[in-house]
Structure formats: C-alpha cells, structure tokens
C-alpha cells in the first residue's frame, strides 16, 4: 500500500461520523461476546448443545422469566452483531440531517433511533420462544429433521421470491429514500423512524432468521453465513439478484431434501 493510499484511508476513517464508528465497534463487541460465550445461558448446557436446533429456546422457556430474559439478551446481542453493519448508511445520512443541532440534541436523536431499532429486533426473539412453546423444535428436529429443514427451506425460498420481500428490501437498500419519506423532527420523530425502519428490516430478513432458528439459533457458522447474506442483500448493487438466487437455491434444496426423505 502506498503512502498516498494510507493517507486516503486515514482521511476516510476520520470522515466517518461518530455514530458509524460506534455502531461498527458495537457490532464487533457483539461478535466477540457471542464467540466467547460471555452471556450465560440457564442450565449450563455445553456449547455443542446450545448450537443444536431448539435447545436454547427450550432451556430459556424451562427456566421461566430469568431464562427468557437471558435468551432475549443473547438474541439482542446477535441482532447487534448481524444487523448493525448494514444499517450504518441510514445512521450516517440521519446524522447529516441533525448536524446543526447541539451535541446533546444530536446525541439524543441518534441514540433514540438506535435504541428503538435495537429494541424491536430484540423483541423479535419472543417469536422463536412462542413457536417453541407451541411446537418444541428440538424433538421435532431430532425425529423429523429432514422434513423440518426442507419445509423451512421452501418457506425461505418462497418468501425470498415474494413481492413483500423486495418491497421491504427496497426500503432497507435506500436509506436516502427512506429518510425523504419518513423523516420526522425531534426525538419522537427519531423514535418513529427507528420503529418504521426496524419493521422494514424485519420484513426483509425474518425468513432468514426463521431458518437460523431451525438450524440452531446459536450455531455460529449459520449465524455468520446469514449475516453475510443479509448484509450483501442490503448494501451491494447486486443485492436483489443475490436475494433471488438465495430464494431459488433454498426452494430447490427444500424440495430435494423432502423428496429424498419421502422416497
């Protein structure tokens, strides 16, 4: 790397708003927390068990409010690790709209936007807990694993190819358009935008996370793969084409898996 390139990279880093640096550091810290298992889970299960399908959800439910609370903390940490990096463009643009405010006022609005976005994603962790309460995932995966995985892959494939996926993906890929449409002044406006944007993100990514839960919600490999996929979908020029390819691949894999099982 030449001296000129080094200077350009340093200059680019300095041009990053503080909120972007904070979000990248929080995402990095979340990944470290997950990899080192710093958040205790009830029951003290071995790491291999915790990465098995349905095990974290079953253990959380089995330990009542404390277990549910720890599960949501872990789920929220996973969402920070997986979602923050691809959400930075929105926060950089929003930071530009409030740059004339005082430091305190700007921090309050950015913190509110980030807090609401994070809270919504954390609360989505209640969904796998509710599903596991109605239909225990672990025994179902143990007894009918190929059928379960095949069915979820077909669900993922169908949603990836649906107009609802692309409607939400378009909002996630166009932070400027989102701000032009939904920007509201004040802290209440920041909260409203955080809620709207998080719901669009959930609408874009929920099927990928449904597959992750069935594959093992704390399986680091699947977590990393899905994080890369959803980040590329939302940030690169060929993101929509990737979403289509993932949908086709998932659908075909699901049909083949079920077909082989039924033979």
Image (cartoon, rainbow, N blue to C red):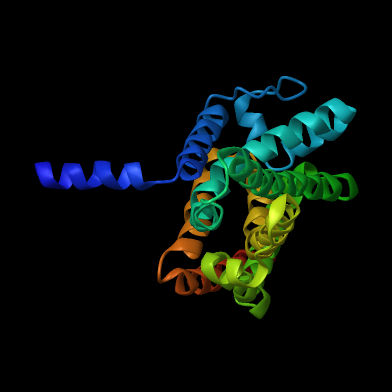
Indicate left or right for 9 with 260 as reference.
Answer: left
Residue sitting at x 76%, y 29%: 70
| Residue 172 figure quarter | bottom right
Q: Is residue 239 above or below residue 210?
A: below
**Depth order, front residue of 103/201:** 103
Expressed as whole percent of the image width and height from the top left, the position of residue 11 reads 26, 44
Quadrant of the rendering where the C terminus is positioned: bottom right
How far from the left and from the top, in percent, is residue 222?
Answer: 54, 47
Tell me: 262 left or right of 173: right
Looking at the image, how many numbered discs can be counted on the residues?
0
What residue lies at 66% left-to-right and 30% top-to-bottom? 49
On the question of residue 79 being in view, the answer is no
The residue furthest bottom is: 163
Return the residue found at the far top: 44
Whether residue 186 is visible here, answered yes or no, is yes
Residue 153 place in picture, x, y as percent: 63, 63
Q: Is residue 94 left or right of residue 62?
A: left
In this view, 171 is above or below 123: below
Which quadrant of the figure contains the N terminus? top left
Residue 96, placed above or below residue 216: below
Q: Which of 150 and 12 lies nearest the eye of the viewer?
A: 12
Q: Residue at x 73, y 52 (%)?
A: 191
Taking depth in this image into account, of 59 and 201 the one nearest to the observer is 201
Q: Position of residue 44 (x, y in %)?
A: 72, 19
Query: Can you tell which quarter of the image residue 51 is in?
Result: top right
Figure check: 163 above or below 122: below
């Amino acid at each position: 790397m030449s001296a000129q390139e080094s200077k350009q990279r340093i200059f680019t880093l300095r041009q990053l708003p503080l909120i972007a640096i904070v979000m990248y550091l929080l995402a990095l810290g979340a990944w470290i927390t997950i990899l080192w298992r710093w958040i205790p889970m009830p029951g003290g299960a071995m790491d291999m068990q915790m990465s098995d399908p349905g095990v974290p959800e079953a253990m959380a439910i089995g330990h009542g409010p404390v277990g549910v609370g720890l599960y949501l903390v872990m789920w929220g940490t996973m969402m920070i690790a997986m979602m923050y990096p691809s959400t930075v463009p929105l926060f950089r643009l929003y930071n530009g709209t409030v740059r004339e405010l005082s430091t305190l006022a700007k921090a309050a609005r950015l913190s509110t936007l980030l807090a609401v976005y994070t809270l919504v994603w954390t609360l989505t962790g209640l969904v796998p807990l509710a599903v596991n309460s109605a239909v225990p995932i672990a025994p179902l995966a143990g007894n009918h694993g190929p059928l379960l995985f095949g069915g979820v892959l077909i669900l993922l494939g169908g949603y990836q190819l649906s107009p609802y996926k692309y409607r939400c993906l378009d909002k996630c890929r166009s932070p400027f358009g989102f701000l032009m449409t939904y920007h509201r002044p004040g802290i209440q406006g920041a909260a409203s935008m955080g809620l709207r944007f998080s719901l669009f993100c959930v609408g874009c990514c929920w099927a990928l996370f449904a597959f992750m839960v069935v594959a093992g919600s704390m399986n680091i490999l699947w977590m990393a793969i899905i994080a890369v996929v959803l980040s590329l979908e939302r940030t690169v020029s060929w993101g929509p084409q990737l979403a289509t390819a993932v949908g086709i691949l998932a659908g075909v894999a699901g049909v083949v898996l079920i077909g082989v099982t039924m033979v």
